[in-house]
Amino acid sequence: MIFIVSLLGNFTTSEAASINVRLPVNPIKNGGARLYGLTTPDEHDRDVARIQSLTHLVANLFVKMNVQRTGMTTRSFELMMSAVDMVRHDAPEVFQAIVTANPYAADVLKRFKSLVPALDEPV
């Protein structure tokens, strides 16, 4: 398996887009290997804002609420706690980079906060 951490280096998203840099995303299983479709930096930032920002926002909420595992559990709770555990000990700079540095994260955060009053309503 090959991981590419950062193809952009010190480029901004718009600079990278102007030189047509494409980033690997969307893993597609092919036997034991993973092939990656390509996307532009702008598409990458938009998708990552949704998936990473939400993961970090929910994990941050769980940590601040001091949600703990007990003797009783459910599969969905365990999956959520696993996601929380993956980011619980990240440096604060990681959270800030994901939630504030990505130009699309502000919209995700705004929508997340706007839906707080509806949390007690059924899905």
Image: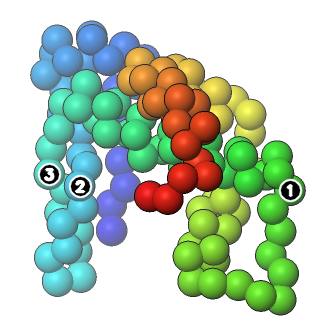
**Residue with the mark numbered 2:** 26
Residue type at mark 3: give it.
Answer: Gly
Q: Is residue 106 left or right of residue 94?
A: left
Type of amino acid under label 1 = Asn
Q: Position of residue 80 (x, y in %)?
A: 60, 66
Q: Nearer the viewer, residue 76 or 86?
A: 76
Q: What is the x, y in percent for residue 9?
A: 40, 25
**Residue beneath disc 3:** 37
Residue 122, given in percent of the width and then of the height, sits at 49, 59
User: Which comes before the other along the chain, label 2 or label 3?
Assistant: 2
Mark 2 or mark 1, which is nearer the start of the sequence? 2
Residue plotted at (44% across, 58% down): 123
Q: How many residues crowd around disc 3 within 10 Å: few (fewer than 14), some, or many (20 or more)?
A: few
Q: Residue tagged by mark 1? A: 66
Q: CA distance from mark 1 to mark 2?
A: 33 Å
Q: Is residue 109 among what the camera can see?
A: no
Q: Nearer the viewer, mark 1 or mark 2?
A: 1
**Residue contact at pointers 2 and 3, CB within 8 angstroms:** yes
Distance from Cα at disc 2 to Cα at disc 3: 6 Å
SS type, badge 2:
strand
The Cα atoms of the two marked residues, 3 and 1, are separated by 38 Å
